[in-house]
C-alpha cells in the first residue's frame, strides 16, 4: 500500500478549489468539483486508490451521502466491488439502522439498510467520504456499519482537516487513510 509522494499530493491539492465563507461566514470550504472536472487529477486519484486497496481483501465499499458516493462508487467500479450507501434520514426505502450525531446546533442523523451487507458476518468494509472535519459524520457511519455485524476495517478520506481532530478521534475505532491534509 503505497502512499503518495509530496509532489503527487501537491498536484491533487492544486486541483481542489478553496472557497471562503461558504456555506457560512468563517468556513473555508474545500470544493472537490474542480478535481472531478480535471480528468488527469481524477484518473490519477482513482489509480492511486485502486492500487492502494487492490490487495486489501475488501468485501464492500460504503459511501456517505453525498460526496462520498462519488468517490466510493468510482472506486467500486475499479475494484469490482459492491457499493453500499449511507444516507440522510428517510431516503432509504427498506428497514434501516440509524445513528444520530451532534452538529454545531442540533443533531443530524444517517441511515443504512439493515441488510446492506447481505447478512455477511464480519464482511470487510471500507468507508469512504470526501472529507473528515470534526469526525461526527464518519464516526456515526462507522457505528452504523458495526451495527449490521460487518467490520469497518478502514476509513478513507481525500481530505483531512487536521486542526479539527476528527481523524484522530476515528483512529481510536478503525484505521484511517487520508490522502491530503489541510
Ligand atoms: P464532520 O462530520 O465535521 O467530520 O464533517 C464532514 C462532512 O462535512 C463531510 O461529508 C464533508 O463533505 C463536509 N464538510 C465539513 N467541513 C467541510 C469543509 N470545510 N469543506 C468541504 N466540506 C466540508
Image (cartoon, rainbow, N blue to C red):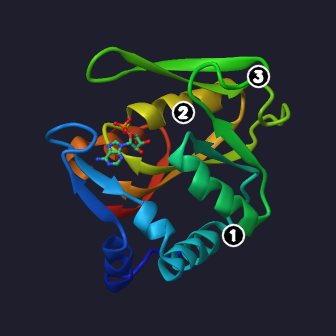
- The local secondary structure at tag 3 comes to loop
In the rendered image, the quadrant that contains the N terminus is bottom right
Q: Nearer the viewer, mark 2 or mark 1?
A: 2
Quarter holding residue 66: top right
Whole-percent x and y of residue 64? 56, 41
In the rendered image, residue 32, in percent from the top left (x then y), is placed at 41, 60
Q: Which residue is mark 1?
A: 54
Q: Which residue is mark 2?
A: 141
Q: Which residue is rendered at x = 27% and y = 17% of the image?
A: 105
Residue 182 visible here: no
Q: Residue at point 28% right, 50% down?
A: 29
Contact, mark 1 vs mark 3 (Cβ under 8 Å)? no
Of labels 1 and 3, earlier in sequence is 1
Q: Earlier in the sequence, mark 2 or mark 1?
A: 1
Q: Nearer the viewer, residue 108 or 124?
A: 108
Q: Nearer the viewer, mark 1 or mark 3?
A: 3
Helix, strand or loop at disc 2? helix
Amino acid at each position: 500500500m503505497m502512499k503518495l509522494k509530496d509532489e503527487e499530493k501537491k498536484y491533487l491539492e492544486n486541483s481542489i478549489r478553496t472557497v471562503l465563507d461558504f456555506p457560512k461566514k468563517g468556513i473555508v470550504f474545500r470544493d472537490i468539483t474542480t478535481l472531478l472536472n480535471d480528468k488527469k487529477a481524477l484518473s490519477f486519484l482513482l489509480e492511486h486508490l485502486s492500487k492502494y486497496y487492490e490487495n486489501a481483501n475488501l468485501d464492500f465499499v460504503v459511501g456517505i451521502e453525498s460526496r462520498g458516493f462519488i468517490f466510493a462508487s468510482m472506486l467500486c467500479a475499479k475494484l469490482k466491488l459492491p457499493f453500499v450507501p449511507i444516507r440522510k434520514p428517510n431516503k432509504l426505502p427498506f428497514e434501516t439502522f440509524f445513528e444520530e450525531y451532534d452538529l454545531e446546533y442540533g443533531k443530524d442523523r444517517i441511515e443504512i439498510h439493515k441488510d446492506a451487507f447481505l447478512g455477511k458476518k464480519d464482511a470487510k468494509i471500507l468507508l469512504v467520504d470526501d472529507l473528515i472535519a470534526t469526525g461526527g459524520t464518519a464516526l456515526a457511519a462507522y457505528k452504523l456499519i458495526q451495527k449490521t455485524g460487518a467490520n469497518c476495517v478502514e476509513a478513507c478520506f481525500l481530505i483531512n482537516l487536521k486542526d479539527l481532530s476528527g481523524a484522530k478521534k476515528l483512529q481510536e475505532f478503525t484505521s484511517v487513510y487520508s490522502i491530503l491534509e489541510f
